[in-house]
Image: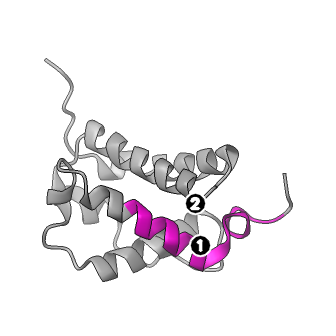
Amino acid sequence: MSDQTLYRRLGGRDALASVVDTFYDRILADDELRPFFEDVDMTKQRAHQTQFLSAVAGGPVEYDGENMAAAHEHLDITHEEYDAIAAHLDAALEIHDVPADDRETVLTAVESFRDDIVTIDASPA
């Protein structure tokens, strides 16, 4: 593995912005997830997500978005929906030829926010 940061291995800001575009294109095409973004300014959302992924990948940016729990508490996101979003992120990274090890590193970093994002424990009865 390279001495480069994950951010550099992923290709930097422009490459991450492309991944984010693919990620949201996939989410907006998903009938189950699209409703979460109906009233969202997607230009701002894409920029925000690019900043977030850049920060978790060790890039030269600090995430200055809202606290994760506060930003998601009103959305009633389940573990199943979180998993679907993570799967779209993994697919977007793969489409952009991100190696499996680096995809796993990104997904592990994002996974650390699950408890702040998931607000509904929709365990089967």
Neighbour tally class for label 2: few under 14, some 14-19, many 20 plus, Cα within 10 Å: some
Distance CA(mark 2)–CA(mark 1): 8 Å
* Magenta stretch, residue numbers: 4-23
Please name the amino acid that badge 2 sits on.
Answer: His
Q: Residue at x 45, y 67 (%)?
A: 20
For the residues labelled 2 and 1, say whether their Cβ atoms are less than 8 Å apart: yes
For disc 1, the neighbor class at 10 Å (few under 14, some 14 to 19, many from 20) is some
Answer with left or right where residue 54 lies relative to residue 30: right
Tell me residue 82's x, y (percent): 32, 45
The mark lying in front, picked from 2 and 1, is: 2
Let me know if residue 65 appears in the view: no
**Residue 40 location, x and y as percent?**
20, 74
Q: Nearer the viewer, residue 28 or 102?
A: 28
Q: Secondary structure at mark 1?
A: helix
| Position of residue 123 measured from the top left corner of the image (x, y, whole percent) | 21, 25
State the image coordinates of residue 46 (x, y, percent, origin top left).
Answer: 38, 75
Which disc is residue 96 wearing?
2
Identity, as a three-letter code, of the amino acid under mark 1:
Ala
Residue 19 shows in the view: yes
Question: What is the magenta segment's predominant secondary structure?
Answer: helix
From the viewer's perspective, is 91 left or right of 117?
Answer: right
Labels 2 and 1: the sequence-earlier one: 1
Q: Residue at x 23, y 41 (%)?
A: 78
Secondary structure beneath dot 2 equals: loop
Q: Which residue is mark 1?
A: 15
**Quadrant housing residue 56:** bottom right
From the viewer's perspective, is residue 114 above or below residue 123?
Answer: below
